[in-house]
Image (cartoon, coloured by chain):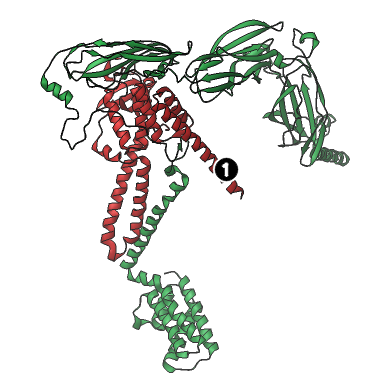
Chain colours: A red, B green
Amino acid sequence: MRFGLVVGIIWAGMIVANAAAAERYAQAAAAYDGKQYAEARALYEHLLHEGLRAPELYFNLANTYYRIGDFGQAILHYMNAFYFAPRDPDIRHNLKYVLHEADAVAPAIAWTAHIFRLANRSEWTALATLFWWLTAMHTLFVCRPNQRRLCKLSMIIAAALLVFCLAGIQHWRQWRSQPMIVVTSAGQEALFAPLADATAHFAMPQGSIARVDASLDGWYRIRVNKKDGWIRQSDVTRVAPWTP
Amino acid sequence: MNWKTVILNHDKPIAAAGMRPDVIPATRKAACLAACFFVLALNVGALSVRMTLNPDTLRMGESANLVISVEGVDRGPAPALPEVPGLRISGPAVEQSVSMSLVNGRMQQERTLNYRYTIVPLQSGEYEIGPFRYTHKNETVTIPAKVMRVVASADGSGQDGEPISLSDLVFAEITVDKERVFVHQPFTLTIAVYSRNLNLGRNVSLMNMPESGIQTQPFQEGGTTREVVRNEVYDVRRYQTEIRPLTAGTIRFEPKLRIQVMVPRRRQRRDPFFDDSIFQGLFSNMDAQPFDVTVTPVDVVVRSLPETDRPDSFTGGVGQFQFEAHIRETEAQPGDPLTLTFVIEGKGNLDAVSAPAVSESDRFRVYPPRMTHSDLDQAGQRGRKVFEQIVIPRTAESREVPPIAFSYFDPDTGYYHTITRGPLPLNLREGDPASQRVVRADGVGPDHQARIVGQDIRYLKPAPARWQRVDDTPWFATRGFLAAQIIPLLMGLAVILVARRRHVLDADVARARRYRAPRSARPGLQRAVKALRHNDVDEFYTGIWAAISTYFGDRLNLPPGAITAGEVIPAMREHGLDEENRDLLESVFTACEQNRFSRAGSDPDTMQALLEQTKRLLKNCVRLPS
């Protein structure tokens, strides 16, 4: 009885909190429609500040930043949205469009990464779990002489798919170990050394995306299309996931 | 934990009297023993609690130590001190001290728990702390009251000799430079902390500030000044910040300030080694006591920007801005991209200002403007933003870029202002017709295909069905999920073990038969039990024979024709069959053979006994090593 009451209170609290978030979300969309982009941005960021996360929220905030003309922040939030919903065609389109508009640099994507980006980490984990259990189930039948050949074949297929799904998980785990960053300050360059007066190596316009190789005293060593360089951490922002 | 060792040498008078401790007269021994028991009884039975207050007279701004010592216990509940209006009592810090003593050659320990409280007076006057009760293990002790006298600080009391409180010595005020502002119009919030005759710490914590609807910059500390308030001279520290409201409404500022009042540290007891003025001078001799100061709330009314007279070119700028627009190339051909540069600078919500833009028309194809340079101060309130927009003239008739308007709202005047730049002249010449065709080619194509007339980002997405929280643990990282993934692993291991065992048994027939021997004897025994129930003698002996023949056949890997007592008994003796079981085995075999060949009748009791013997025999044989 008491447990049910507590669950009910928590459930009711969640409904009220969701309703408040939905109302603020609608206000932000109305402000966007009315071309009040500053207000829309403040409302979307307020939702983020409250600890809410959703690819739709990042997408709309990115659109708002694009309308304001801040392409760096726009690309950053499209990338955040992409991390959570990599198959979403709207996110892919807008990200590609704004990258083109901003003349930003982005790392080339390998064909394997294209495949791994067909599902997010959570979906790869669900598939891997399914194939893990299927592989295990096959071991129960593989010892039966009359089904051995068929079982072996399907077990090998399930195990191969499991390995593939694990590679998909690893792809997204890499976003945590070697995070992606977006240049959010205008007119940046990657330098040859983590020193303010080092020689510039290549340009990193606002909105450019790179992968972090290492960090050192307020600098990131980044890698873009087989080129290495150092950039100040204060001029870039890390893409999701943020927690180590 | 303080350990203090006190050694009391009670043997000394005895030695001085020329006696050895081991030759003490019996009467004195008995007296000593009785005294010890008496002391022990006192220690165990009575709860002893002392309360000390040091100092009991102090000035405002000083603190006192109150120590409650509970003797003879290892642990116990902290005394619940009654609240005394006008005093702030913090603590307790718990210390344990152990004193060790040598009594009559025996080491004795006495433990004391000290509960140390710090008392800071908030008002001058005379206070009585206690009396109150302390209970430990069903024993209750009443602790008598202590009286503490607090006098005003060195320069005297409040006006007209009234008692002075800490809130008279330290208070704070909050002010804003504007009480009615528009959305995005910044205003300055100042917090002033007034203090006199007090030593305040550097750290001031600000709590209970509004958490949403405003954008706040870090507080800047101004210098310390002096002001006269109610004929008293106060030191005043000011903290300022600039706040920008983001949504309309009334914002109430009623922060709570936590300041640190530095009070001289009181030593509980003098340290014979380090109680030195040099060390006291080297190390801090002050304690920081937190003190919360509430301030009178201030409301700021935030108004929405007026809807009336809002120009179409308004892009959200609130403040005072300058706007310039120019074109980089003026000589071009139709189809050539031209770069328009817009510069917005000034004071206001520059970080949120977006660029004006030339609209798509029959004469120009346009790309959205983008920010190319931003030079803003930390608050994003002052500075300069540069945008660029690419426009492509479609025809040579485009003689000028149409006027570009930038509108902003000036909160000081309460009106919208529009700055218009242009038209910007162009010198377009007729160029290669092919390039014109490229520009005009947009949307030209077979009739059944959609005409693409522009490019833009896709529109907003609806609200998500389910909001995720940043601190939610993903389902795949929960303990339950991770633990469940061990199950397939265990299943796989079990299957491997079973398969391996089966493989071994397939390769070794004797071992396989030995392994299944107890199981193979079961049907025969069940058959015998059933036959016994129906008094079927033949069937009974057939069952018994089946049980022992299959068991020993499998156990010893014998062919069916070789299962006789003459074969089985020597083989089983090699496995350690003792004499008693050997006789049993022989008798079971004999009984079966007699009945099978001679058809001698059997009464149920004999059959029941034979069944029990067979069961016991098989059970004993199973226990024998293979």
Q: Chain of mark 1?
A: A
Residue B391, horizontal then vertical, whole percent: 24, 19
Residue type, numbered disc 1: Ile
Front in this rendered view, residue B464 or B222: B464
Q: Quadrant of residue B263?
A: top right
Q: Secondary structure at mark 1?
A: helix
Residue B463 versus residue B626: which sits nearer the camera?
B463
* Vertical order, B457 against B551 (above or below): above
Question: Is A196 left or right of B440, judged from the image as shown?
Answer: right
Residue A209 location, quadrant: top left
Circle 1 residue: A9
- Callout 1 environment at 10 Å: few (<14), some (14 to 19), or many (20+)? few
Q: Residue at x 44, y 88 (%)?
A: B539
Determine whether, in the image, residue B352 is placed left or right of residue B288.
left
Q: Position of residue A81 (x, y in %)?
A: 36, 33
Q: In the current view of this chain or complex, which residue is farthest to the right?
A: B27
Q: Position of residue B283 (x, y in %)?
A: 62, 15
Compared to B395, does B98 lie above or below?
A: below
Q: Nearer the viewer, residue B583 or B65?
A: B65
Q: Position of residue B72 (x, y in %)?
A: 76, 36
Q: Is residue B146 toward the left or the right of residue A24 in the image?
A: right
